[in-house]
Image (cartoon, helix red, strand yellow):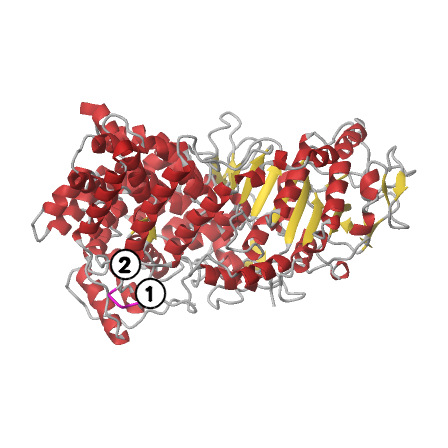
Amino acid sequence: MPTVLSPAAPPSTAPLHEVIDERIGVALQAKGIAPAARASDAEFLRRIYLDLTGSIPTLGQAQAFLDDKSPVKRQQLVDRLLNSPEYARQTQRVFDVTLMERRPAKHVPQAQWEEYLRTSFAANKPWDVLVREIVAADGADANLRPAARFYLDRDGEPNLLARDVGRLFLGRDMQCAQCHDHPLVENYLQADYYGLLAFFNRSFVFTPKTEPKAVVFAEKAEGDVAFKSVFVDGAADQPARPHLPGEKEIDEPQFEKGQEYAVAPADGVRPVPQYSRRSQLPVLLPRGDNVAFRRNIANRLWALMIGRGLVHPLDMHHAGNPPSHPALLDLLGERIAAMGFDIKAFLRELALSETYQRSSELPPGVEALPPDSFAVAPLKPLTAEQLALAALQATGITDVQRAALGPALNEAALDEKLAGNIAPFVSIFAGPAAQPEQDFQATLEQTLFLSNGSVLRSWIAPQAGNLADRLNRINEAPAVAEHIYLCVLSRRPAAEEVVELTTFLQARAHDRPAAIQGWIWGLLASDEFRFNH
Amino acid sequence: MMGATVGGGLAHVSGLSNLIQPAVAEELAARQKRVLIFFLAGGVSQLESWDPKPNTDTGGPFRAIPTSVPGIHISELLPLTAQQMHRLNLVRGVNTAEDDHGKGAVFMETGRRDSPAQRYPALGSVVSRLVAPPTMALPGYVHIQPGGGGVNKADAAFLGPKFASITIGNGQPPAYLLRPGDLTPAADQQRNDVRLKANQRFTARRRTAETEAYSASYEQARQLVERADVFDVTKEPPQDQERYGSHDFGRHCLLARRLLEQGLTCVKVTHTNYDSHSENFDFHIEQLGEFDRPFATLIDDLAQRGMLDSTLVVVMSEFGRTPNINHLFGRDHWSKAWSVALAGCGMQKGAVIGKTNDNGTAVVDREVDARNLFHTYLRALGVDSTANYPGLNRPIPIGDPAGDAIQELLA
């Protein structure tokens, strides 16, 4: 079934962020919802750093931004961060988890895959180009071998690839349509599932005898898929040829028996068919006129920044689960395609919107607001990596490493120094491998790790140049408060927080260093630290 | 009504408060169901355990002995277990058609055939999600095994890591359970007060289910730290430690009893290694010789304490072993006709369901597979296994719709 577009929006020359706010605003008015106030500078500062760089600002960065009087300082900060090397690394992490779901590396080393993603985002490679590289890759071309990880580290399993290509690039999780038409989703047809499967059913992971490590994704010239519903007794097999969901089956060239191969299969020989089914996918999938493809990425980037998709869950685009703002999603899809799938430019528009820049605090007297109204910024739990990096920055361990690197300091060198500290957080805070990201859960292991684990305790304990050490050298309690709140929570303390901390330290003057460490832990373990707000 | 609604309702309440009225807590405890899984890793031989075929070409050297249920015989390698037969049920017609260790384990534990495109949660994680009280300080699913500890997130699949198994490696308590030596309880309390004060301010106008869940995890951790000795089996009376045996499996079974008595919902005990491709008979003398006493003792203790009626006990492997005896006196992987034992939780007692032929090479009556067993476990626990999981953002049935429960086991 072809996707039906909502009535075309009137052409607008306004910047996209203004159009977003206009559309969201109209819907809010229609529902009579008064949105939350604009985020404070401090709220915005922490949020944009976490979203675009994966960590919180340093003390100096926080002070500089909060003290900046320029009316365009938010826009300037967005531009600076988008052009920072930290942006490329953070976006690499986001798309690594999105595309590979923390599978262990098997045929392509994790480091090579990460470097491929990082350099792609550093160069601002358009999304359609990136996806084309990934779905075209077979692992034989050394330059693009990392891109083949998507296929190879899923062992080329056709059902898994059909499901994940549907979910990740088209926003449709058609798993339930494997055995029958989806019982609850009328658009997800078994024929569409098998149409996607047919791109892959002839493909297999081939291991060359001479180089067992240089596996490639190969393809045969024969093999068809057919399906029947498990719900219909005695149903006849229905053949399926490759097609994207809702589109027509591809016409395929026919070859005479014996002519199907450019390189015929033989023992130890990688076969090459005259006609490759799989090679049709990079032609058909990553296109600006592929509505599902462009909407999927627009929705995913929206969710990344704004905390929830216009379609939610992200891989359930179907008629029974319509977007909260259909015309806006249409427009975002059209715009990102028209922008040449420029990820940075699109993220910039989202970041500049008032919708993104709302406070996470509900208006006074309001108990709750519908999450799909985007009237208030949602709390986004920090990812495992964000949590580790933010804790490293907050406790001053990152500062210590910066100082140690001296003139050799750059983003890559610092990342290498910190990587070992991120690993334990990933093992404890990341979801199960090969599962999509879950809704937020707080596990016992995580909380015990933060409470009793030696990792965080060692960061909090004083060592030359870290937060505790610096605080131990500050005498005046208000100055201690200013320093600790800026470092840990990226904001200045409220007056009553200064009073509380002063009282706390006075009462524990005999053991001031322990008291300071207790205060640092209390803030690190707080909701305000755990969530991007 | 499905049992899950108990958990669902409470989860809603716990969003507002961790405190349950004492009367409610008591009622819950009375209704509280528990699960005890024995996983005999490698694949126990049904012929040397639950379905002996003495004096046949496949039967091997061991005799079949009478049990506490007239007419039911099991292998002589399980003499003490035989005396518990009136509390156990045998399913002798299991055909899982999966001879790979990994895939066999996935099928048995999740009730779904292993599929690359979708992993389903293991029984213990399902129980942790649907049966365990959401407000309990103790983890919902603990796995005791020889070797290392940790958290197996894959067990929980789409239910999320909160419902993963926490593995007690060789009796060691879970990681980070113990407060560091240089942190006094008073200092711990003080830093916790700082956290609470900060949260109070932050959530005044930002309270969400996520902040509630995060706060609750600190309260749960605090309570568990106070009860750290729940995991300390040496706190059990010396005479019990003697009854269970001083070897690892004996201590692990006693720890399982301790955890279940303290209110933990699902405990899995792994006993290895039954993968006897050679010297099958010596292997089983040794392994089942170790298994028999602690297992029978634990069944007896649960019954004596009145806990067996509310505790589902399952003894499973990834598959059974070939009737054919190979040239190394071993038996190989065999999933076509093997047995699972189960007990408790209001099920039948002393029943045998299904039958294999004379030399055990095929199921001849009431063939079942892991899907039927999985539905049966959940039905025994009061969960409607044909319903969808609650609280997911997509419809996923709890049990495989292609299977159903073994009705005649359910009382």
Q: Quadrant of the N terminus of chain A?
A: bottom left
Label 1–label 2 contact, CB within 8 A: no
Comparing A79 with B116, the one in front is A79
Residue stretch in magenta? A363-370
Coordinates of residue A509 in the picture (x, y in percent): 25, 35
Q: Is residue A145 visible?
A: no
Q: Marks 1 and 2, how far apart in space?
A: 11 Å
Establish if B136 lies above or below A26. Answer: above
**Is the residue marked by circle 1 packed among few (<14), some (14-19), or many (20+) residues within 10 Å?**
some
Establish if B228 lies above or below A299. Answer: above
Q: Which residue is mark 1?
A: A372
Q: Give yes or no for residue A368 being in the magenta stretch.
A: yes
Q: Secondary structure at mark 1?
A: helix
Q: Is residue B117 left or right of residue A118?
A: right
- Give the residue drawn at x 36%, y 33%: A457
- Give the residue drawn at x 20%, y 55%: A349
Q: Give yes or no for residue A135 being in the magenta stretch.
A: no
Coordinates of residue A486 in the picture (x, y in percent): 20, 42
* Amino acid type, label 2: Ala
Q: Which residue is mark 2?
A: A377
> Most extreme residue toward the right, as rendered?
B55
Q: For mark 2, name the chain.
A: A
